[in-house]
Image (cartoon, rainbow, N blue to C red):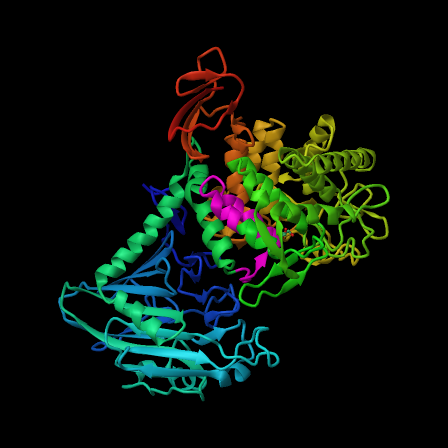
Amino acid sequence: MKKFSTKYGYFSADGNEYIITDFKTPKPWVNVISNGKYGLVISQTGGGFSWDTHSEFNRLNRWHQDLVQDNWGKYFYIKDNDSGDFWSPTWMPLKTDLDFYQIVYGFGYAKFISEYKGVKITLTVFVPIKEDLEIWNFKVENLTDQKKSLSLLTYFEWCLGSSSDHHREFHKTFLETHFDNQLNCMTATKRLWEIPLGDRGHWNIEYPYLGFISCSEKISDYDGDKDTFVGQYGSLQNPAGLFASSLSKKLGKWNDSIGTVKTSIEINPKETKELTFFLGIKKNKRAIAQSLKKFSSPKNIDDALIEVKLFWQKIFSNLVIDTPDSAINLLVNKWLRYQAIAGRLWGRTAYYQQSGAFGFRDQLQDSLVFLPINPDKTKDQIRLHARHQFVDGTVLHWWHPISETGLPTKMTDDLLWLPFVIIQYIDETSDLKILSIKEPYYDNKNKKDTLYNHCVAAIEKVLTRMSKRGLTLIGAGDWNDGLSAVGLDFKGESIWLTEFFYLILIRFAELSKEISNDTDYKRYKRKASDLKKAFDKYAWDGQWFWRATKDDGKKVGSKSSPEGKIYLNAQTWSVISGIAEPLMQKKAMDSVSKHLLKKNGCLLLSPAYTKPDKMIGYLSRYAPGRRENGGVYTHAATWAIWAYALLKDKENAFKSYKNLCPVYNGLNPDEYVAEPYVTPGNIDGPISPNYGMGGWTWYTGSASWFQKVIVDWILGIRAAKDGLVIDPCIPADWKEFKVKRNFRGTTFNIKVFNNHSKKEKNILVDGKMISGNLIHATKKKHSNVEVYL
Ligand code: GLC
């Protein structure tokens, strides 16, 4: 049964695949495929690129960001040697009108099924677990009554190293290609790596890898030069090499280096032949040879794909929900998790934004996705980020793996995400031992300090950034990167940050108490209470909380502001942090419902800035209604669900989920434009001519938080220090739902009955009624819970 079908595609019945039936989607719809080290992003017409370890520093192939043409990828040409017909099995680059063309995206693979003049090709692309390579497996079927003689040619441009190497006349002089007959493989490397490493000046180092392309069939011909293969003034739709009887075999250091290899097959009528191309980045030829040997049998290739599928199903199996809303089920059970892990924690790249770096706050938040599944992975992320903190508590806003260089931040909130995520981790696991794990600082590798002290360093630093009236100073921004100039002189204050900091102080004080650090406990309690006093005194704007003050003292996000009068985060976090009085929380969220909750979720602010404000920052320079400038910013919009749920506002909690939900928005694809199976970073707001258009899909923050707020706050099954809380905030017309959730070693099978006929509200754990709504951890492997609401 097709699910959520539109004119462009649908989800498979089991939710494991999205099938694109019309490849002319309104924008490229991609899959980010990664095993945590090697990865690739691929679009429905075969565009995209691959990388090892860092999607910007170590790219296999050149790619340029053009979401209109989407004409950079690793491409194939198929040629019928008898008829002279030719086509591409991913439509691009030849753009032949195929008789049939469908794309299937699954977890860890993409499948392109095409038919042209009696030749059916099923092309499956995937990255095996723990391998620095990608497999392009062709199953070619001759549907005709005549024998077919086909040639297959590949085409891509070697990048090898830093992207984007747009100055190609410079970069091409360092690239070199080779062909190894014995390995049946073209290799390529570069004599320069444009990253800040090495001890003899900049860029003065070798690229230490070999890019390669090989094939399971004998490579009969090849070309390492665009000049000869495409031809001067030629095009990818009409490359000279496709019509030549043989290729130029040009290799070496003097070319505009490409990866074109050719192989030929003969297929009898009704016969299917299988062949596979292997591409990747390896240290040396020996490593290439090992992998090629490993995948020399078709069975090993099939097994490797099965292994990938099982890997993802295992990740999905630890948290399974079953609700009356099948879009929620699809997202939470599979796609959000896949996006957060493959796209954000591993690839850290997609079509709208390529990064490869770790954002201090970004991947920490993204790693929350692992809490109910495998909290050790969150712990690893916490430790990694702690190592990118300076002794003074400040951090790198982002840093690059490989070079380990980054941008020291003057944003105040960045540092606080470390304690935030540690608190979440302890709620999940009760593992206080994490606080005594030691990690060094970025600027002093010899100083190994406990994670507790890393948190203290962050908190103490923020305590030095307080305004005279006791509110937190924003510096170069807080969560909202675009508020980049509000507080550059360290005079501007932030209300959102004050709220966030309050939560950190309260929760961290509790942790200090747990480990018997009474001094810190008292200090942070006192600081929290001071913060609340200042907040109560200054933050209210009449109908909502204002957002910030600029260095010149003028308010941002206030009724007195000319534009950007109300900001979402200052309202949602007044509730989430608990800093505001209940009545004010309610009023603030009423203002959200009135001014910000729109058809695609909650806007980040309103009205959008139409005039750039130098004292606010680049946020005000975005096109009005786009991204942080008055669009729906998914990351923040998920927090609205949380805040409404805290206020027990079932209707708006669900509405703010449903309006944001990509599966539902995707039912209106020509307006929404973006992929329906992943969250977008942003959706255009009402002031934009493209109101409702999603963009920046696969972006950070959005998927992990969406999963968390749905499970923790709509379904209301969440980890707390003392146990598992059952506190649903579901629509009145839901009769029941189920959650299978792992919690501290026990698999809880929870059934919730809503508006049931029983008189009492109660919770039964393994048949026994409990008082309250907190289920304590148990030593049992399984536990059944019935909840009557
Ligand atoms: C981007 C940044 C993230 C920030 C958000 C809001 O997603 O990566 O760190 O919080 O924008 O500006």
Instruction: Give the camera-side residue of 743 and 554.
Output: 743
Using residue 642 as the reference point, say whether residue 232 is left or right of it. left
Residue 608: x %, y % from top left: 70, 49
Q: Residue at x 50, y 44 (%)?
A: 369
Q: Is residue 376 magenta?
A: yes
Q: Which residues are magenta?
A: 352-380
Residue 218: x %, y % from top left: 24, 77
Q: Residue at x 41, y 72 (%)?
A: 283
Q: Quadrant of the N terminus?
A: top left
- Name the quadrant containing residue 4: top left
**Residue at the far top in the pictured view:** 759
Q: Is residue 619 magenta?
A: no
Q: Residue at x 61, y 78 (%)?
A: 202
Residue 518: x %, y % from top left: 70, 34
Using residue 344 as the reference point, say whether residue 321 is left or right of it. left
Q: Report if residue 14 is visible in the image.
A: yes
700 relative to 496, above or below: below
- Name the quadrant containing residue 498: top right
Residue 167: x %, y % from top left: 56, 79
67 relative to 169, above or below: above
